[in-house]
Image (cartoon, rainbow, N blue to C red):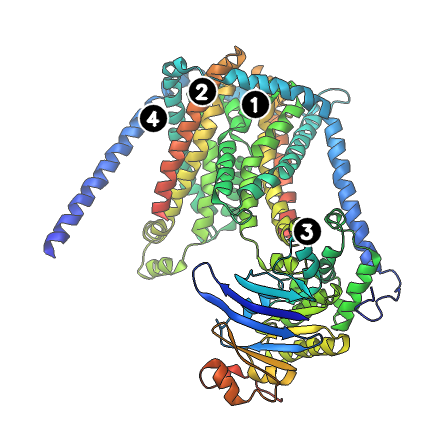
Amino acid sequence: MRDTRAYKPISRRIRFWLSIIVILAIYYWAFQGMHFEGVQSTTKTVMLSIINGFLHPDWSYVYIPDGEDLLRGLLDTLIISILGTFVSAILCIPFAFWASTNMSRRLTVSGSGKILLSVIRVFPEIIVAILFIKAVGPGAFAGVLALGIHSIGMLAKLYSETIESIDRGPQEALLACGANRLQVLRYAVIPQVIPQFLSYSLYRFEINIRSATTLGLVGAGGIGTPLIFALQVRNWSRVGVILLGVVILITLTDIISGKLRKRII
Amino acid sequence: MIQFHNVSKTYPNGSIGLRHINLTIEEGELVVIVGSSGAGKSTLLRSINRLHDITEGDIQVGGKSITHAKDKELRRIRRDIGMIFQSFNLIKRATVLNNVLSGRVAYHSTFRTMLGMFPREDIELSLHALERVNIREKAYIRADQLSGGQQQRVSIARALAQEAKIILADEPVASLDPLTTRQVMDDLKRINQEMRITTIINLHFIDLAREYATRIIGLRAGEIVFDGSPEQATDEAFADIYGRSIRHDEMLGGEV
Amino acid sequence: MKPAVPGSGRKSPPDIQLIRGRYKRIATWLLIIVVFILCSIHIHATPYKLMTGLPQMGSLLQEMIPPDWSYIPTIWQPIMETIQIAIVGTTLGGILAIPVALLCAYNMMPNKWVSIPMRVILNLVRTIPDLLFASIFVAMFGIGPFAGMLALLFFSFGIIAKLTFESIEAIDPGPLEAMTAVGANRLQVIMFGVVPQAFPYFVSYFLYTFEVNIRAASVLGLVGAGGIGILLDRSLGLFRYDRASMIILITLVIVLAIDYGSTRIRRSLL
């Protein structure tokens, strides 16, 4: 009894200190890659001009009667995320049924679906966007396709979890009425999953609108494009007004989408 | 008419569900199946519309073999058999009317039902079915807002809208309180008598079985051990079915 | 066939609720379709564009195969830098998140004049995506990993602080009362009442954010904020898709490996 009591803390203590040493080593290695030293020289003047710019946003940029302005950029961003969410919300349905364990008899079917979805998920949307820009040219359409394809990974996973959690009873009832497979799907499965699907799609929309603001940085449309131009010429007052617009747009869509989600469930 | 010819069912894990069942149920009967849990009541009921496949023998419904029916034929036979479940099995988020209408799907083409466009007559039929079980005014309310007894009446209405010639009820009152139990049983009895729909009910309340049935079938370990009128089903007969004396919780109680 | 329900042949007047329901459904669908079409027109998205674009996409994917294996030694260093950015950014963001999470939680900071403004700030920070932060910091501090690290710092600060303050609000108040009862001051209550309960959650969110940040760090370079993304941008610009696919492949392997390790640690924590 005494032996084990004396023994355990020592091995535990060794493991504890070992992991501390490993963590410290990792941090030492990580921090020295950051090159903090090269930063200080110009910081002060840059900071002052930035603060000055942010305090005096370029209000004239908000609306320009004919030309690229903030409102049009934000509208493009909103539209890219609406369409992107729309495309993925529909495209992901077959994937979701494919990946649900209770929709196919063989586990290999749903297993392969799940693997495919996680592969889609690890591809960052910005890379998907670059690939689509090469295919359909720069612009909002490439952004829509990028969001549409990338979101399938997450949405289909959430959808399939919903499908896996449905009550089997109504399916049995429909079968007993003489319904065929499609009819069972339409009348027993779909009504149970649709509200959850809608809610997840709205949630994904909230994520997509954030992504849509960045798609323009690589040329896939939306507010990111004027932002990167303003950043390149260090036009801080314009950067300020664009950031303000982005914050307002995202806050508003978050609030609206959150309200809708509460009503659906 | 439903006929069982030497029907047996063995589950994949080797346990036996039904053992050499020979049974004929005539049109218009109200048959109550009793037996302790695990005796095979549910298996027997679900083999009639082939929600469970049997491993031996043949079941004929209205002269047609459901055991050997192919896909389309099977659905055609199932269309004429309404089913009522212990847990109601309604689509909780859909309206009552849509739940009743879903009983009509087998009458229409897949394409039409995919669009959810039911003809006017179907809607009238469904509303009248709801009227028969006295919940016409709930037609546009979501099913999950109803009480248990009301939900079970919706599923009866679904079977009526289906224009079923046979109703199978698998423990229809097991999740209801005594008062609503009687209302649901009264509905089933009335429909059976007025419309001559053959009705087969699994029950575990002995007094209810005696009160409502025109014929009682007792199952024990997958075999029919009793088949007779309610008058013949004495306490001794039940004790024989259950293999022990009757317990208090197998009586619903109240006025009989 | 004779109607099974007597009286069902009788025509009743059209049902108002039924008609209203039908119109509502049709109107909803129409609205959705109209919005979809208007949006598509606005951004000049046409099926024709998709049809002509997809073959190009196909040839592009073809060029990606096989990946350029000889490129591995060149991308090794930037890959390590990507991991460094994620580690430092997540850590500093996480440390910064602790006091803010405490100030945001109603049960730690009963003074609403502090907690509500803190929450507003937190929500504002969370509206800005990581790549936006990165492109701003690149403009401020120049191209390099430092800008990327700062971007991830703010980004992870937002996530970790939000998740942590929510779990602080959900902790069992019993131990806090016990600590107050034995005469502990506020800091002691936090140290011995809150930290033991909230710490596992904090670490779990920290690791989760680290997983997110590894993915983010791999693309930060596209806007010049250090890491492997810079090489990816260069390869794509030079149409060296075989190198791009090599980079993507390596990144995926690293991401999956870190996901696996981190998920295992998280499971053992909670």
Q: Separation of disc 3 and disc 4 at Cα?
A: 57 Å
Residue B70, position as x, y percentages in the image? 64, 53
Q: Which residue is mark 4?
A: A30
Q: Looking at the picture, which amino acid does disc 4 mark?
A: Ala
Q: Nearer the viewer, residue B225 or A126?
A: B225
Within 10 Å of disc 1 (Cα), the crowding (few <14, some 14-19, many 20+) is: some
Within 10 Å of disc 2 (Cα), the crowding (few <14, some 14-19, many 20+) is: many
Q: Residue at x 52, y 61 (%)?
A: B55
Q: Helix, strand or loop at disc 2? A: helix
Front of the two marks 2 and 1: 2
Front of the two marks 1 and 4: 4
Q: Residue at x 45, y 47 (%)?
A: C165
Residue A216, position as x, y percentages in the image? 61, 23
Q: Which residue is mark 2?
A: C247
Task: Judge if badges 3 and 4 mark residues of a common chain.
Answer: yes
Q: Separation of disc 3 and disc 2 at Cα?
A: 47 Å
Q: Looking at the picture, which amino acid does disc 2 mark?
A: Ile
